[in-house]
Image (cartoon, helix red, strand yellow):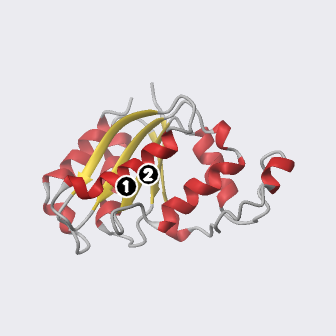
Amino acid sequence: MSKNVLILSGSPRKGGNSDLLCDEFMRGAMDAGNTVEKIRVSEKKIGYCTACYYCQKSGGVCAKKDDMADVLQKMIDADVIVLSSPVYFYSIDAQLKTVIDRTVARWTEVKDKDFYYIVTCADEEKASQERTIECFRGYLDCVEGAREMGIIYGTGVYKPGEIKESPVFKEAYEMGKTVC
C-alpha cells in the first residue's frame, strides 16, 4: 500500500549533506511506490512560537500568519514523517526545532505516524548525534501512536556533498525503499 511521506529537511544549506540524504531517502521511497514531498524548512517563512496560546482559544489556528499552517496540515495528513537536521552544538538546528515547536497549535492531530530520522555532523562518532536524536524522540514522546522506524547517521561530513562518498548515502536510499 502506498504511503504519504513528508520529509522535513532542516538543513539551511540546499545541497548540504543532510539535505542530500533526504533526496536519497525520497528517491528510495518513491521507487517503492510512495507519494513523497520534501519541504526545505529554511525556504519557508515560519516564526517562533511565542507561547501566546491563541491556538487554544481559536480551534488550532495560530496567531502567526506564515507558512506553518500549511506545513502542519501536511504533517497531519502524512503517514510517514522524516525529520532531518545537521547537528549544531550536539543538538537539532533552529529551523527544524521551530517547526516542531509550532506544531503545538494542533499537535494532538499529528498522530499514528511512522518517523525516520536523518542526522549529519562533522564528528566521526555517532555518539555526537545522540542529543539530536533525543530531541526527535522527545517530540515523538508527545505524538500519540508515533513509531520510530529508522535512523540515518551521517558522520564525518562537513563540506557540502561529502556525504556522497559515504556508504550512508546508499543506506538512505535503501531505507527509503523500505517504506511501505
Q: Residue at x 53, y 28 (%)?
A: 145
In the picture, residue 63 is in which quadrant? Answer: bottom right
Along the line of sight, which residue is nearer the eye, 70 or 148? 148
User: Residue 117 bears which disc, if any?
Assistant: none
Q: Is residue 63 left or right of residue 157?
A: right
Disc 1 residue type? Answer: Thr
- Whole-percent x, y for residue 180 in the image: 39, 29
Circle 2 residue: 135
Q: Quadrant of the N terminus?
A: top left
- Tell me the crowding category of disc 1: few under 14, some 14 to 19, or many 20 or more residues within 10 angstroms, Cα based: many
In the image, 152 versus 177, the foreground residue is 152
Horizontal side of 142 relative to 120 (left or right) equals right
Point out residue 146 in the picture as x, y percentages from the top left corner.
50, 33
Q: CA distance from mark 2 to mark 1?
A: 5 Å
- The amino acid at mark 2 is Cys
Asked whether disc 2 touches disc 1, contact meaning CB atoms under 8 Å apart, the reply is yes
* Residue at the image point whose x is 23% and y is 75% from the top: 159
| Left or right of residue 47, residue 26 in this image | left
- Percent from the top left, x then y, of residue 128? 25, 58
Residue 61 position, x and y percent, is 79, 52
In this view of the protein, can residue 26 be seen by the observer?
no
- The number of discs equals 2
| Element assignment for label 1 | helix
Q: Is residue 132 above or below residue 173?
A: below
Q: Is residue 122 above or below residue 114?
A: below
Query: Mark 1 highlights which residue?
Result: 132
Of 108 and 171, nearer the camera is 108
In percent of the image, x 28 and y 40: which residue is there? 175
